[in-house]
């Protein structure tokens, strides 16, 4: 068993109740490391092409990484994966908190779950032993109630729970897998996969400890970060949380507003900032496993029409923008209430907010009426209507039943021209970062194997300054470039930054912490844990392997270069604000996409990873799989 890992992967078949344990060799762990790579490996190995994402044959995977669960900042991350019911392709969602670390201490690096239970069940894992237990008494409960009931039933308040709420039970395609009540593996609709398997929760408790190669070196690195993070932007995260990001977004004209029609929220942005949250509704600060930054805000509202229970945490930047500015809502209490409803019912706040903003635009254009919405005047700026709609989506009632399918499918059902302003890529709603102020980001949305995603993406403005460029210099990226550049040098930068960000998903390390780590400390961290002499080049290749395997999976499932696109709205200039006149240039964007394919070793006109690239990444067996199914000649 390699240092740093539990050394075991749990397999569960809910149809047969069979539980197995696999013990991969050291080569498996060094090649795949965790997260995305492990998810892609099992999806290719065990999932036949064309499987129904909501059928019993789909594979639901929980995966940690080499850093997950070790006593160092940022080690609370884990991933959930499956074939996505939202996009039909590679589904993956990242999540923080404590659950992933607890799984590793319970003796497992990952869980693969197939089949479908006849009745609701939950999986209970404690110190290397797993069992399937009845969960009919938990079905239909909100997430906080479920966690409390499980801890009482299991007699341990330190049990960590990953679960679905009623939205996942009812197969909403924007349902999340909630961890610790207020951390969401929100993207790509994986809560619906869990619901389709009649799996309510995975409860874990571990008292073990993973061995590391060099405990003293690990301790030294952990202390180094505690002493240095206040000198980085992590201090801003501690002071105003991720919601503090709304201020710069508004000021440079990139704050999504009214379904991405504008880049500034002049009428309400000051009311929904992280600073406003600190000054008004914050109750305390929360953190993830072993992290000193404490960027998670816990809020409480006792009076007024929007009560908020602190058990559900508080809204992050993505939530504040998706349910706030993008819906034209400047009421912080209403946004916090909507955040609570999303966490309680188990919904992706990004998809939920963008879907509601699509409906609001349709209503204001006269393409949707009160006959569609069940009598609700669904207009931008109406906080009460926004909150009401979130609850209807969570319950899959009324107009919420349609919206619970996500905006892409809702628009296909409604028609009437509403398809023109669905803000999605590959069926997944666009996050709260605007391509008209980050041109490379728009390209990243288009080519992402998961559909629109900001975590593993390329944020151009980070690399406009010498300081921001520091984290790419070790890979030979030496010159800053402006946000609106889409030339070959910018694409080279993107083709480096995207795999590097994907490394965090593979290692199980928080992106916020990784970006404030000295590069060589991250390299030393992996060595201290595993004993491997892994270079930065090897880590970068692990991220590239993960991203490329996900693209290969999509190709096997029928995706083509025609799916690598983003909404026409991003090619239309802003009419006002600091970014007035900004728009992605269509022809230049298309050239950039082809250049990206070439630099990543994908087919120039197909976007499919080539056989030689897959062999270069050490996964030639994936090329054989693509040839077997006629994807590669």
Image (spheres, rainbow, N blue to C red):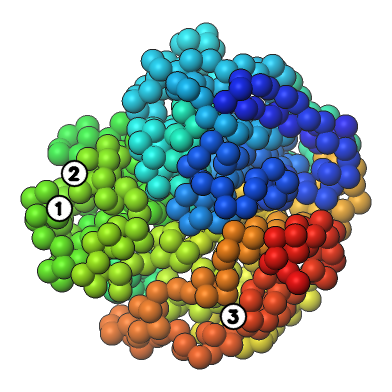
Q: Where does label 2 land, which residue?
A: 398
Residue 96 appearing in the image: yes
Position above or below: 168 against 33: above
In this rendering, position of residue 528 left or right of residue 494: right
In this rendering, position of residue 198 left or right of residue 233: left
In this rendering, position of residue 432 left or right of residue 460: left
Which quarter shows the N terminus? top right
Position above or below: 586 against 240: below
Q: CA distance from mark 2 to mark 1?
A: 7 Å
Measuring 61% from the left and 20% from the top, which residue is drawn there? 17
Q: Secondary structure at mark 2?
A: loop
Percent across and percent down for residue 24 are 83, 36
Measuring 57% from the left and 31% from the top, which residue is drawn there? 115
Residue 79 sits in quarter: top right
Mark earlier in primary sequence (2, 3): 2
Position above or below: 116 against 155: below
Q: Where does label 3 land, which residue?
A: 593
Mark earlier in primary sequence (1, 3): 1
Question: Residue placed farthest to the bottom in the image?
Answer: 587
Q: Which mark is residue 247?
A: none
Q: Residues within 10 Å of mark 3 (few under 14, many from 20)?
A: many
Q: Residues within 10 Å of mark 2 (few under 14, many from 20)?
A: some
Percent across and percent down for residue 71 are 71, 34
Residue 396 sits in quarter: top left
Residue 461 appearing in the image: no
Q: Secondary structure at mark 1?
A: helix
Q: Are marks 2 and 1 in contact (CB under 8 Å)?
A: yes
Q: Which mark is residue 373?
A: 1
Measuring 52% from the left and 8% from the top, which residue is drawn there? 155
Q: CA distance from mark 1 to mark 3?
A: 39 Å
């Amino acid at each position: 068993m390699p240092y740093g890992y539990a050394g075991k992967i749990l397999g569960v078949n809910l149809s047969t109740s069979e539980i197995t344990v696999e013990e991969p060799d050291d080569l498996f762990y060094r090649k795949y490391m965790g997260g995305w790579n492990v998810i892609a490996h099992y999806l290719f190995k065990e999932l036949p092409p064309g499987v129904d994402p909501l059928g019993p044959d789909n594979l639901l995977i929980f995966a940690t990484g080499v850093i997950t669960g070790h006593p160092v900042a940022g080690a609370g991350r884990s991933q959930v994966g499956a074939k996505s019911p939202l996009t039909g392709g590679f589904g993956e969602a990242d999540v923080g908190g404590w659950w992933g670390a607890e799984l590793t201490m319970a003796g497992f690096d990952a869980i693969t779950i197939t089949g479908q239970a006849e009745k609701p069940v939950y999986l209970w894992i404690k110190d290397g032993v797993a069992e399937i237990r009845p969960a009919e008494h938990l079905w239909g409960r909100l997430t906080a109630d479920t966690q409390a009931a499980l801890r009482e039933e299991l007699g341990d308040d330190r049990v960590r729970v990953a679960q679905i709420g009623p939205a996942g039970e009812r197969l909403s395609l924007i349902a999340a897998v909630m961890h610790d009540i207020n951390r969401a593996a929100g993207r790509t609709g994986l809560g619906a996969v869990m619901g389709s398997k009649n799996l309510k929760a995975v409860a874990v408790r571990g008292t073990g400890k993973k061995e590391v190669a060099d405990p003293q070196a690990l301790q030294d690195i952990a202390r180094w970060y505690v002493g240095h993070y206040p000198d980085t932007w992590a201090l801003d995260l501690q002071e105003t949380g991720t919601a503090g990001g709304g201020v710069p977004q508004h000021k440079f004209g990139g704050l999504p507003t009214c379904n991405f029609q504008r880049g500034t929220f002049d009428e309400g942005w000051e009311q929904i900032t992280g600073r406003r949250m600190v000054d008004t509704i914050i109750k305390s600060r929360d953190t993830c496993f072993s992290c000193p930054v404490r960027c998670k805000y816990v809020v409480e509202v006792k009076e007024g029409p929007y009560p908020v229970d602190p058990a559900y945490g508080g809204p992050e930047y993505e939530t504040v923008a998706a349910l706030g500015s993008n819906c034209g809502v400047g009421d912080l209490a209403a946004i916090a209430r909507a955040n609570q409803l999303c966490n309680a019912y188990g919904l992706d706040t990004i998809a939920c907010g963008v879907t509601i903003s699509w409906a609001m635009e349709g209503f204001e254009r006269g393409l949707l009426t009160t006959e569609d919405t069940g009598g609700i005047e669904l207009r931008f700026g109406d906080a009460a209507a926004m909150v009401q709609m979130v609850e209807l989506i969570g319950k899959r009632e009324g107009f919420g039943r349609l919206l619970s399918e996500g905006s892409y499918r809702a628009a296909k059902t409604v028609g009437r021209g509403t398809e023109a302003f669905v803000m999605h890529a590959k069926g997944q709603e666009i996050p709260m970062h605007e391509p008209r102020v980050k041109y490379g980001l728009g390209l990243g949305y288009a080519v992402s194997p998961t559909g629109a995603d900001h975590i593993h993406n390329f944020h151009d403005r980070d690399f406009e300054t010498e300081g921001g460029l520091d984290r790419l210099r070790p890979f030979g990226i030496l010159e800053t470039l402006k946000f609106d550049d889409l030339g070959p040098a910018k694409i080279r930068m993107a083709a480096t930054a995207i795999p590097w960000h994907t490394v965090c998903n593979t290692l199980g390390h928080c992106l916020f912490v990784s970006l404030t780590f000295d590069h060589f400390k991250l390299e030393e961290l992996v060595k201290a844990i595993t004993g491997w002499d892994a270079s930065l080049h090897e880590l970068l290749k692990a991220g590239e392997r993960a991203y490329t395997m996900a693209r290969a999976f999509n190709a096997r499932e029928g995706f083509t270069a025609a799916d690598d696109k983003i909404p026409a709205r991003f090619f239309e200039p802003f009419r006002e604000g600091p970014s007035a006149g900004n728009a992605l240039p269509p022809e230049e964007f298309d050239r950039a996409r082809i250049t990206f394919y070439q630099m990543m070793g994908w087919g120039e006109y197909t976007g499919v990873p080539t056989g030689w690239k897959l062999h270069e990444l050490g996964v030639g067996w994936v090329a054989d799989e693509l040839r077997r199914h006629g994807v590669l000649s």
